[in-house]
Image (cartoon, grey):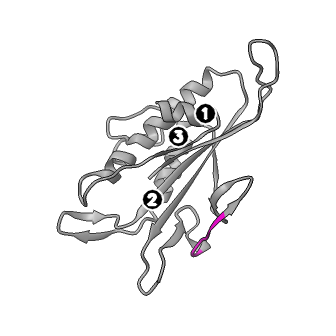
């Protein structure tokens, strides 16, 4: 909750699942998608992972706020392609984009160029983006897991505050551009 609160305030935060192969990192982050009726709903289900749970908390907190906030999401995958010298980056929401590049700018910091970003106005929208991206992940079987991802996925929620929010003294608050990335 501290990381999500920081992202709402305009900071960049990362939640990283770390562990050995087959330990449940992907399940912890993504959960079990498409297993419950009405999986595009707003309510958090017991099989939901950290991403959907964070989205639920995010929209609940934003509903209590008076500021105008725009939420969007992207979903990328880093993998080792056969014969490639370096890792490749794929947009899971636009697989036709090919191998994307990591760039740097003074305004944005590090970013993935040409990465598709989808607007999300609800938990259901975040769930739809997550489910669409999961369908495009690369999987490969190994001894510990029949459907192991064998890649690194980065699901990012962008939280842009562009409203007319005011502090307790009536002064306009600055615009903020936060994000939380789930790896």
For the view shown, which residue lies furthest in the top direction?
169
Q: Secondary structure at mark 2?
A: strand
Q: Is residue 182 left or right of residue 63?
A: left
The residue beneath circle 1 is: 8
Front residue of 90 and 105: 105
* Marked residue nearer the N-terminal end (1 or 2): 1
Front residue of 81 and 104: 104
Q: Residues within 10 Å of mark 3 (few under 14, many from 20)?
A: many
For the view shown, which residue lies furthest in the bottom direction?
83
**Residue 13 belongs to the span the image colors magenta:** no
* Marked residue nearer the N-terminal end (3 or 2): 3
Foreground disc of the pair 3, 1: 1
Please give the name of the residue rendered at 57% of the width and 25% of the height, measured from the top-left corner: 61
Residue 20 spot, x, y in % from top left: 25, 58
Residue 25 spot, x, y in % from top left: 32, 52
The residue beneath circle 2 is: 153
Q: Residues within 10 Å of mark 1 (few under 14, many from 20)?
A: many
Q: Which residues are magenta?
A: 98-103
Look at the magenta stretch and give its main secondary structure: loop
Q: Does residue 139 sit above or below 28 in this rendering? A: below
The residue beneath circle 3 is: 124
Q: Secondary structure at mark 1?
A: helix
Q: Secondary structure at mark 3?
A: helix
Q: Is residue 142 left or right of residue 1?
A: left
Residue 44 spot, x, y in % from top left: 41, 33
* Marked residue nearer the N-terminal end (3 or 1): 1
Verify CB contact (< 8 Å) between mark 3 and mark 2: no
Residue 144 seen in render: yes
Front residue of 39 and 71: 71
Please give the name of the residue rendered at 52% of the width and 40% of the height, measured from the top-left corner: 124
């Amino acid at each position: 909750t501290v990381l999500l609160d920081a992202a709402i305030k305009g900071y960049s935060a990362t939640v990283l699942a770390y562990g050995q192969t087959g330990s449940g990192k992907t399940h912890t982050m993504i959960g079990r998608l498409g297993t419950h009726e009405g999986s595009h709903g707003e309510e958090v289900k017991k099989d939901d992972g950290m991403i959907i749970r964070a989205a639920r908390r995010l929209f609940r907190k934003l509903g209590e706020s008076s500021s105008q906030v725009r939420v969007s999401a992207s979903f990328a995958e880093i993998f080792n392609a056969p014969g490639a010298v370096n890792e490749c980056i794929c947009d899971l929401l636009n697989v036709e984009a090919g191998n994307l590049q990591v760039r740097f700018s003074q305004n944005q910091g590090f970013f993935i160029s040409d990465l598709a970003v989808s607007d999300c106005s609800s938990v259901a929208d975040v769930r739809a983006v997550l489910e669409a991206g999961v369908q495009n992940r690369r999987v490969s079987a190994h001894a510990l897991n029949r459907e192991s991802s064998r890649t690194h996925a980065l699901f990012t929620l962008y939280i842009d505050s562009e409203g007319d929010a005011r502090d307790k003294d009536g002064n306009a608050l600055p615009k903020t551009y936060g994000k939380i990335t789930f790896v």
